[in-house]
Image: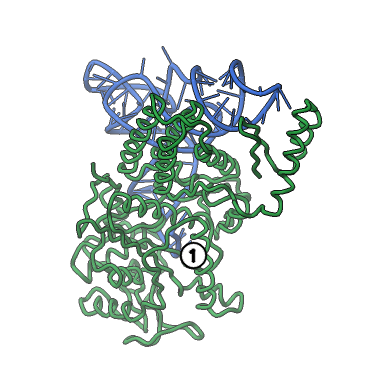
Chain colours: A green, B blue
Amino acid sequence: MTIHIYNTLSRKLEPLTTIEPGVVRMYVCGVTPYDEAHIGHAMSAIVFDVIRRYLEYRGYQVQHIVNFTDVDDKVIERANAVGADPLALSTQLADEFLGQLAALNVLPASAYPRVTQTIPEIRAFVEGLVERGYAYAADGDVYFRVGQDEDYGKLSGRSLDEMLTGTRFEVDPRKESPADFALWKAARPSEPAWESPWGPGRPGWHIECSAMCVKHLGSQIDIHGGGNDLIFPHHENEIAQSESLTGQPFARFWVHNGMLQLVNPATRQVEKMSKSLGNMMTIAKFLEQYEGDVFRLIVLSSSYRSPLTYNSDVAADNQRKLERLRSALAPASGTLTSGPVAEQLAQAVTSTHDSFTAAMDNDFNSAGALAALFDLVRAINSARAAALGGAPFSEAQASLRALAGVLGLRLEPAQPQQHHTLEPFIELLINTRNELRKLKQFALADQIRNRLAELGVTLEDGPHGTRWKL
RNA sequence: GGCGACGUAGCAAAGUGGUAAUGCAGCGGUCUGCAAAACCGCCAUUCGCGGGUUCGAUUCCCGCCGUCGCCUCCA
């Protein structure tokens, strides 16, 4: 069985082959930290986190690079608006984002390079393109000569002719062709700038990713990822720059996640979540209401390539889904360790592994993998009901935890240690209620349960006592 | 206008050329003093619409309708 991945470049499912056996070099476009991160950014991070975790589960060593565009027009604009230093602003927002990714259980990438740490490499990259005739300087700017690149447009499926007939290009007289794009931008007053052969300036947007790729992973990589809104022009231009400089294919696989969408309150239309459209849910706001696992489940529940519409119903559904997954981790209630029940459960573990792997091998079909997990949940709960315990039971639970972990799900109870002060009081009420139940004072006992429920504490009476949760 | 993705039960969402996973919600049952949780069972003769290919299509092809993304900064 081999892993198959949908490649935007070929628009087909292709078997994964890597440049170096057993190693996957993966570069994912990160964010431009100029404002608070929203759950669309989180979706993309989680998608590639799951891909990375699964590749590692299948035995690959993954070199995972995610960049920060810490200096660009938007950062500068925003910094000026709030009276901050651009680099201080982007550094602070990037650090915040990294903290949120940790809360969402996204594994740290191998490195998080930033533009400002890659200036010499970017400069050298641009110089190389100029030397080879793929770029030209004009008034302190440097532009990529798109017409020089014969297969420009191959990723996004457009031809240069089509693009030139479009009316939406602003005409810049310094450009040889309207489709040429900036590799280096001359500094304007009071902007961050670095010295260069063309005068002080800063990198254009697309060049940084090409330069960081080469710096951290080499001139050829296995997977290049990002949101599908980056296909054009960003990734198209990355290919143009990189392949023009090296003469070699840049990335084997181009992997793109779909957009997170949200109903725009102004237009009542479902639209891509975006700062500029004004319809967004920040990661911070989401995490105030729900655990990280809930958002991860939302992302895992559908194909990473499809658009995903977020609303509060979706969040609530997935909250319950999470509770169902956790139900399988409740302790055993019996002590049976052999017999048909044990065999059935062992069988279920095996078939779950098989379906999980088959689903994930098929372009990371996380929804299918999740379905396999739910089958195992039912099998474990059935076995518990049939009094299975001991090693056969705990081993099945360990399998569930392990596979959920491949998807990055923690499955830990919410805030397990935060109720130390509450605990004795709740226990006291539970004990009192159980005394009342023994005395058949059910009206009072039910009143305690109902009052606790109103306060957010749920009681469950089982054969071995009463359990509670917030 | 060009390029691309998608349209499956009340909702979310997998999937396959041979008669539809999974989760939520709902319904019936077991358990319980009653609940809750868990378990058992039910819940799309049907996969946007119309043609075509095929012994057979939800799955392949064509057209139409609808939704979304990109074509300008964007995960």
State whether residue A164 appears in this view. Answer: no
Reading the image, the residue beneath label 1 is: A98
Work out whether A120 lies above or below A221: below
Work out whether A359 lies above or below A134: above
Q: Nearer the viewer, residue A384 or B18?
A: A384
Residue type pointed to by label 1 = Leu
Pinpoint residue A242: horizontal percent, then vertical percent: 26, 68
- Circle 1: is it few (<14), some (14-19), or many (20+) Cα within 10 Å? some
Q: Residue at x 56, y 50 (%)?
A: A291
Location of residue A69 by image quarter: bottom left
Q: Chain of mark 1?
A: A
Work out whether A96 lies above or below B33: below
Q: Nearer the viewer, residue A340 or B7?
A: A340
Q: Nearer the viewer, residue B72 or A283?
A: A283
Q: Residue at x 61, y 33 (%)?
A: A464
Secondary structure under the numbered disc 1 in the rendered image: helix
Location of residue A393 by image quarter: top left
Give the side of residue A281 with respect to residue A209, left or right. right
State whether residue A68 appears in this view. Answer: yes
The N terminus of chain A, quarter of image: top left
Q: Residue at x 79, y 33 (%)?
A: A447
Pinpoint residue A268: horizontal percent, then vertical percent: 60, 45
Pinpoint residue A434: horizontal percent, then vertical percent: 73, 33
Q: Nearer the viewer, residue A367 or A12?
A: A367
Q: Residue at x 54, y 67 (%)?
A: A96
